[in-house]
């Protein structure tokens, strides 16, 4: 009886060692090799696709959670002018995307994102070259687009600088402390609305807060807007003709 048990264990010994070896290879490849592949792809191939310089300090990949972390990503124009940057980008995908034929992302986090938007003199933006042209052939109206699901999107400590070079007088404004939260985004029909919030502070001390819900199919958005610190003119142009002859209290609003 003892001999038969030993023989039975020996039959599975090779299979057990093969499974251990595959698990070890998967772990080492995931933690060591995949980050190098991603790093080289971002630094070496992305510049040719977007026609800009790209720098990336380091990359992390967790094969068990299928999460990717990019640290200190910077994209600059050919003349070294800033375009966008981020201290940390975290992406957690889902294996169920392969089974459901949908793009499913559990979590996206961006920390310390900087974006520079410039309206050029020829009335183009500095990102216009990244927008793909419309398709030559008309798309099939009956074809359903791929379903997209995003569990959570969080942007913290963001900054946006906007410069308008096409205006008669140069205009520059900056918004900082940008916070964006999105929960339960789904493009399918009949799903619960996604919740979102947005807040930012301008360089002049103005604050903007938006909170609401949105459904993509069919498109429906409900949101509330709050502004603070905005210097309203003594007589806004839209009510100037109406307020003529009214009391000072009505004109000043």
Image (tube, grey):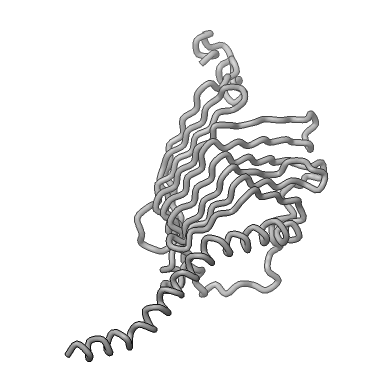
Instruction: Where is residue 229? Give x, y as percent.
Output: 53, 21
Most foreground residue, 180 or 142 = 180
Q: Is residue 218 visible in the rendered structure shown here?
A: no
Most foreground residue, 73 or 251 = 73
Left or right? Give the position of 191 relative to 238.
left
Q: Is residue 107 above or below residue 212?
A: below
Instruction: Where is residue 106? Give x, y as percent.
Output: 43, 57
Most foreground residue, 175 or 88 = 88
Residue at the spot x=63%, y=63% of the render? 37
Residue at the spot x=57%, y=37% of the render? 158
Q: Is residue 253 above or below residue 99?
A: above
Instruction: Where is residue 68? Give x, y as percent.
Output: 52, 56
Left or right? Give the position of 47 relative to 179.
right
Residue at the spot x=81%, y=48% of the render? 78
Identify the image quadrant of residue 121.
top right
Q: Is residue 8 visible in the rendered structure shown here?
A: yes
Q: Is residue 89 above or below residue 239?
A: below
Identify the image quadrant of residue 175.
top right
């Amino acid at each position: 009886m003892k001999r038969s048990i030993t023989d039975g264990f020996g039959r599975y010994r090779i299979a057990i060692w093969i499974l251990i070896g595959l698990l070890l290879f998967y772990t080492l490849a995931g933690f060591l090799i995949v980050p190098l592949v991603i790093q080289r792809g971002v630094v070496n191939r992305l510049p040719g696709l977007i026609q800009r310089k790209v720098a990336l300090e380091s990359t992390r990949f967790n094969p068990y959670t299928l999460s990717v972390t990019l640290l200190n990503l910077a994209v600059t124009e050919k003349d070294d002018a800033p375009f966008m940057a981020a201290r940390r980008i975290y992406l957690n995908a889902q294996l169920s995307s392969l089974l459901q034929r949908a793009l499913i992302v559990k979590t996206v986090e961006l920390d310390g994102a900087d974006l520079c938007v410039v309206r050029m003199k020829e009335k183009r933006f500095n990102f216009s070259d990244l927008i793909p042209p419309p398709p030559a052939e008309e798309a099939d109206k009956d074809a359903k687009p791929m379903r997209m699901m995003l569990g959570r999107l969080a942007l913290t400590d963001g900054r946006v600088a906007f410069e308008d070079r096409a205006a008669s007088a140069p205009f520059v404004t900056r918004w900082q402390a940008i916070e964006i939260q999105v929960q339960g985004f789904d493009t399918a029909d009949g799903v619960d609305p996604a919740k979102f919030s947005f807040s930012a502070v301008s360089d002049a001390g103005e604050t903007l807060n938006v909170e609401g819900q949105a459904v993509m199919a069919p498109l429906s958005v409900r949101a509330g807007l709050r502004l603070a610190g905005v210097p309203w003119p003594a007589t806004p142009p839209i009510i100037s003709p109406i307020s003529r002859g009214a009391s000072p209290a009505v004109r000043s609003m």
